[in-house]
Amino acid sequence: MSVSDQDDLDPEAVQSALRAYGDEIKRKEIQRMFNRLEANQEFTCEQREIIRQMATAIVEGVLTAPELEDNQRYDDEDVQTIVSLFDLDQ
């Protein structure tokens, strides 16, 4: 997901794009991990859920730092830095 030109510095649009970016990485990495590991063993539904929860916790931990909910803490330059850092304008 990308931030459109008109939304580039809208903290809510950037936050939404950042979450979508994190969710997409999480989805791809979980699938990649299951594909690699299931060649050797099958996972139970419970094990799969534990892995998904762990991946969610990792993504949440990484994305907590650039939270944009408190708009007073960030100026346009900060928001633009987050957009650039995570390639949200692509």
Image (tube, rainbow, N blue to C red):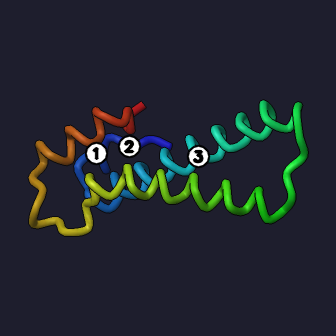
Question: Circle 2 sits on which residue?
Answer: 4
Question: Element under label 3?
Answer: helix
Is 77 located above or below residue 66 in the figure? Answer: above
Local crowd size for mark 2, using a 10 Å CA cut-off: few (<14), some (14–19), many (≥20): some
Comparing labels 3 and 1, the label whose residue is closer to the camera: 3
Comparing labels 2 and 3, the label whose residue is closer to the camera: 3
Kind of residue at badge 2: Ser
Instruction: Name the quarter where the C terminus is drawn.
Output: top left
Kind of residue at badge 3: Lys
Picture quadrant where residue 84 is located: top left
Q: Are marks 2 and 1 in contact (CB under 8 Å)?
A: yes
Near-viewer residue (62 or 76): 62
Question: Circle 1 sits on which residue?
Answer: 8
Local crowd size for mark 1, using a 10 Å CA cut-off: few (<14), some (14–19), many (≥20): some
Q: Earlier in the sequence, mark 2 or mark 3?
A: 2
Picture quadrant where residue 68 is located: bottom left
Q: Earlier in the sequence, mark 3 or mark 1?
A: 1
Q: Position of residue 70 (x, y in %)?
A: 19, 69
